[in-house]
Amino acid sequence: MFVPLDATPRDYAWGSTTLMSELLGTTPSGGPEAELWLGAHDGRPTPIAQGAPVSEHADLADWFASDPRTALGDLEELPFLLKILAAAHPLSLQAHPSLARAGEGFDDEERRGIPIDAAHRNYKDRLHKPELIVALRDGFQALCGFRELAGTDALLADLASTAPAADHRAQIEGLRESLAAPDGLRATVARVLGEPAQDLVSAVVAAAAGGDASSDFAAERALVTRLAEEYPGDPGIVVATLVNLVTLSEGEALYLPAGNIHAYLDGIGIELMAASDNVLRGGLTPKHVDVPELLDVLDFEPRPVPRLEPAVLAEGLSLFVPWDVPDFELLRADVSDADAASTPEFELPGPAIAIVTDGQVTITGAHGLTTLDRGRYAFVTPDEARLRFSGSGTVFVATTQDDAPTS
């Protein structure tokens, strides 16, 4: 069964006023349109479109509760949440917990009687939130994972070389020394976030303004200046200099496992994650920052940019699979007027959500079919079994992996 859905973008302040509506082919709201949620998460289960099969149910969560076997097959719940993310301003620096940590943290906050909607609550559910993102346009910018220390030291040396005052230079040199000490990365982040760091923030911002476009670190300098304009005095500005900065071209992807520090900065992408809303923030935000909890969650191992390369299943079919969790995978099908009978098939491992991001695509399963124009999306029940694609355009299909936990 194919069930058309009808969601409304969330209006977080960092959202773009144009990118979402351009993708969906809708009239701009006039305000920010940041995220389109497609799934059954308690925070905003996706409405079922009027006139669709099972439209007697208000949304996916209501339907799943009424008829889980038809909707989910062997699964107890939908283990993923699919989003369109459209950012015009930086999101907060953040990380997500492991499954074990999320369970412990949720139970602890429940025992302490912290309301689920309290601003200082860290854990909204017992689930982890690994996630992947695929850029839908060139120029998607993100911070992701602590940079290898040699690269960070080179960046800080470059900043120190253009510091406008001796005290600014001393602050940055002190930061370099702190990072070089044993357990230096963790200790430095703890100090920057846990103590007044205005002098250090001011030094980094002043030094960043002194470079030029020919600098090897021009992009990092520009980012510091931008963050200082958006979040003046925020210690997350300093932490951002310790994190990989990457710009994705259309179709390129990142995978952010538990503990990875990251922040999306600008652009539009398909985001797929475990069905959780657990976020530990580390700066660039007016929201609650729990430094001790964040430090326990963060992965402080410096790593290269965590790119996720897709497996090519057939011509036009690529599959993005996270390397450490079974909760989700993301198929991309690029279709070009092929006869549906000769189109490569995709064996559906479980329930799915499909969204067309370009053109018009027909999806044919074992029992039915649906035709989706750009910006439209539908839930797919697991009994459709094998999917074939025809038409002309691009469709993404979020689904589970073969070894996703069953009931």
Image: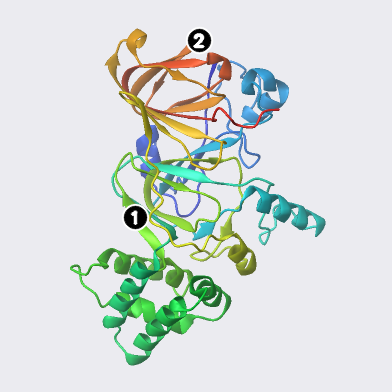
Structural distance between the alpha carbons of marks 1 and 2: 41 Å
Count numbered badges in the picture.
Answer: 2
286 vs 217, nearest the viewer: 217
Q: Residues within 10 Å of mark 1 (few under 14, many from 20)?
A: many
Q: Residue furthest bottom?
A: 166
Q: Position of residue 331 (x, y in %)?
A: 42, 29
Q: Position of residue 117 (x, y in %)?
A: 69, 53
Q: Residue furthest left?
A: 214
Q: Position of residue 401 (x, y in %)?
A: 54, 30
What residue sits 29% from the left and 86% below the top? Answer: 164
46 vs 354, nearest the viewer: 354
Identify the residue under disc 2: 366
Q: Amino acid at mark 1?
A: Val
62 vs 170, nearest the viewer: 170
In the image, residue 182 above or below residue 314: below
Q: Amino acid at mark 2?
A: Ala
